[in-house]
Image: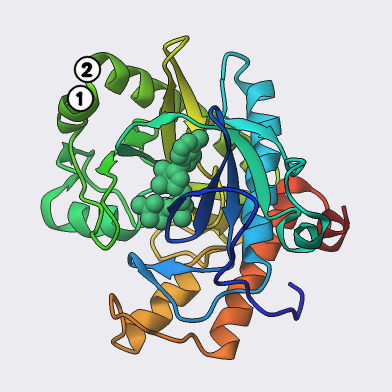
């Protein structure tokens, strides 16, 4: 990406701040609208690194915007929180360089407190569990699967809780998810998450990327009772992306996401530790992987995308 410094802290003086997440800052535009701003912070194993990845926030924001444009063409009934990449008029010109392309205006919604994870391929923690017990999130899975193989029954829904700041998300069964959000919404979220994954998986496969798994979040439009797709969507932060041309069953895959950083943390014994600084080469390699995924999925060059 560019050689500019990573933006790990930022403030938008013109708007009241609603929340700070691991990566994003949320500001109030009006009662129904938020400015959703992505910093260059990166977290792995639920811990934020001391240094960031230059331009990562721009990339996550523009890739999510791409999906918010594409997904409703694939699933016409889909509602999303995306409004526009344009900044609200209350933002002074002096802050445009910082915020443009890093921010989107979104509908402010009540967020369902579960993460709707969908897995198409067996890898990571799912593979570890399967090797021991033949299950994934306690769901029985066909015997004889090899690492990185697609689930023979199709993608599976494996929700988790949405942990409070500083705590780790916890894997839960679909039945537990129904206790948290109610059976009716749980069923709608599961169905929607699986349809979204399937549509996106096919779209990405045509562009040389395998989406091994991903996490969606949903909100409720209380006026219409619609379940709405929110948060970031199908980015390297929320998904495992594999290069389709290097895919081989029976081993781990190279990936376009945080795997590079995660592997380094594990190797150095730094997994889950606070205050870690990534060395230059790890930050650069991660940046390159993110950019490659962006270009493959959008079909455009990164340089052109950020010029706009
Ligand atoms: P946390 O906020 O728990 O640290 P995170 O690290 O994933 O989670 P970020 O991605 O940095 O958080 O921030 C995004 C936050 O905004 C998430 O808590 C998400 O649930 C919330 N969010 C996403 N879309 C909306 C929306 N349309 N309205 C209100 N909140 C939203
Ligand atoms: Mg998030």
Q: Is 235 in front, or is 241?
A: 235
Q: Is residue 263 above or below residue 38?
A: below
Q: Residues within 10 Å of mark 1 (few under 14, many from 20)?
A: some
Q: Is 238 in front, or is 54?
A: 54
Q: Is residue 282 above or below residue 304?
A: below
Secondary element under disc 2, as helix, strand or loop, is helix
When asked about the image quadrant of residue 44, the answer is bottom left
The reply to whether discs 2 and 1 touch (Cβ–Cβ < 8 Å) is yes
Q: Residues within 10 Å of mark 2 (few under 14, many from 20)?
A: some
Secondary element under disc 1, as helix, strand or loop, is helix
- The residue singled out by tag 2 in the image is 183
- The residue singled out by tag 1 in the image is 178
Question: In the rendered image, is residue 208 in sight?
Answer: no
Horizontal side, residue 304 vs residue 203: left or right? right
Which residue is found at the position 21% from the left and 20% from the top? 182
Q: Is residue 207 above or below residue 52?
A: above
Q: Counting residues from the N terminus, which is met first, the one under dot 2 or under dot 1? A: 1
Q: Which mark is residue 209?
A: none
When asked about the image quadrant of residue 206, the answer is top right
């Amino acid at each position: 990406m560019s050689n500019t410094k990573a933006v790990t802290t930022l403030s938008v003086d013109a708007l009241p701040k609603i929340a700070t997440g691991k990566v994003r800052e949320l500001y109030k535009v009006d009662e129904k609208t938020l400015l959703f701003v992505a910093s260059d912070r990166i977290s792995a194993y639920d811990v934020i690194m001391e240094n960031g990845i230059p331009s990562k926030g721009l990339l996550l924001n523009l890739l999510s915007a791409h999906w918010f444009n594409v997904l409703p063409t694939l699933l016409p009934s889909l509602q999303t929180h995306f409004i526009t990449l344009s900044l609200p008029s209350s933002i002074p010109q002096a802050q445009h360089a910082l915020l443009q392309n890093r921010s989107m205006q979104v509908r402010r919604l009540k967020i369902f407190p579960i993460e709707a994870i969908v897995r198409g391929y067996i890898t990571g923690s799912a593979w570890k569990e399967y090797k021991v017990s033949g299950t994934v999130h306690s769901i029985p899975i066909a015997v004889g699967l090899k690492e990185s193989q697609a689930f023979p029954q199709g993608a599976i829904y494996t929700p988790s809780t949405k942990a409070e700041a500083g705590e780790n998300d916890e894997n839960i069964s679909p039945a537990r998810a129904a206790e948290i959000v109610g059976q009716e919404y749980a069923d709608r979220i599961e169905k929607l998450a699986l349809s979204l994954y399937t549509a996106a998986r096919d779209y990405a496969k045509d562009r040389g990327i395998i989406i091994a798994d991903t996490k969606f979040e949903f909100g409720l439009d209380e006026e219409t009772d619609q379940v709405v797709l929110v948060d970031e969507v199908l980015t390297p932060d929320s998904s495992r992306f594999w290069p389709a041309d290097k895919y081989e069953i029976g081993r781990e895959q190279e990936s376009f996401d945080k795997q590079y950083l995660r592997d380094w943390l594990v190797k150095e014994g730094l997994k889950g530790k606070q205050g870690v600084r990534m060395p230059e080469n790890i930050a650069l390699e991660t940046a390159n992987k993110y950019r490659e995924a962006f270009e493959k999925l959008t079909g455009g060059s990164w340089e052109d995308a950020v010029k706009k």
